[in-house]
């Protein structure tokens, strides 16, 4: 598995959002993109992170950012998550794990001594040319949008 770093070209992707609409990285050329990977819809940490992006969505858009969340959940799960928390941005379906693998965030985890594969909560800030400007591996769920602002991008 390739480890992405700042300055790398962001891996191209085409996936489906919560409504089955095709979404590609190329659709965001010319815009700054926050591509955030999270483990699971409607879990406490993921909900906190998504709601932080929701609450700061307009100011991030004003700063030129688009936001896309990605998890390995399906369309129906994403639709419920968006509806329940009034999320104003797209969530991509990655049931085949192609995005989490391309971005190097499908990793071995350990909970209560049990090892399993899962998504490492990670945020990528991608510039208008498709280059990774920042990678946030220690995401603060309650302050996810502030972490992006603190980067000064």
Image: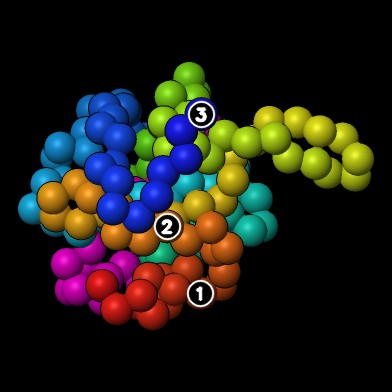
Give the crowd class for mark 1: few <14, some 14-19, many >=20 residues within 10 Å: some
- Compared with residue 87, is residue 103 higher up or lower down, i.e. above or below? above
Q: Is residue 69 above or below residue 118?
A: below
Q: Position of residue 44 (x, y in %)?
A: 66, 57
**Quick check: can you spot residue 12?**
yes
- Residue at 53% x, 58% y: name it: 137
Q: Comparing marks 3 and 1, which lies closer to the viewer?
A: 3
Residue under label 1, please give it. 143
Label 2 – label 3 distance at C-alpha: 17 Å
Question: Taking the image as drawn, is residue 67 in sight?
Answer: no
The percent position of residue 65, horizontal first and vertical second, equals 23, 63
**Residue to which mark 2 is pinned:** 135
Colour treatment of the image: rainbow
Position of 98 relative to 150 (above/below) = above
User: Is 127 placed left or right of 67 in the picture?
Assistant: left
Report the residue at 48% width, 46% height from top.
37
* Left or right side of 113 for 137: left
Cβ atoms under marks 2 and 3 closer than 8 Å: no
């Amino acid at each position: 598995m390739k480890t992405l770093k700042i300055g790398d070209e962001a891996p191209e992707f085409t996936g489906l959002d919560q409504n089955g609409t095709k979404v590609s990285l190329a659709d965001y050329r010319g815009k700054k993109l926050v591509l955030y990977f999270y483990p699971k819809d409607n879990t406490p940490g993921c909900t906190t992170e998504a709601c932080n992006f929701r609450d700061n969505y307009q100011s991030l858009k004003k700063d030129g950012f688009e936001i896309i969340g990605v998890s390995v959940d399906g369309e129906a799960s994403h639709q419920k998550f968006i509806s329940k928390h009034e999320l104003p941005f797209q969530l991509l379906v990655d049931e085949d794990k192609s995005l989490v693998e391309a971005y190097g965030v499908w990793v071995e985890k350990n909970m209560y001594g049990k090892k399993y594969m899962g998504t490492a909560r990670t945020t990528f800030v991608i510039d208008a040319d498709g280059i990774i400007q920042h990678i946030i591996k220690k995401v603060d769920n309650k302050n996810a949008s502030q972490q992006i602002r603190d980067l000064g991008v």
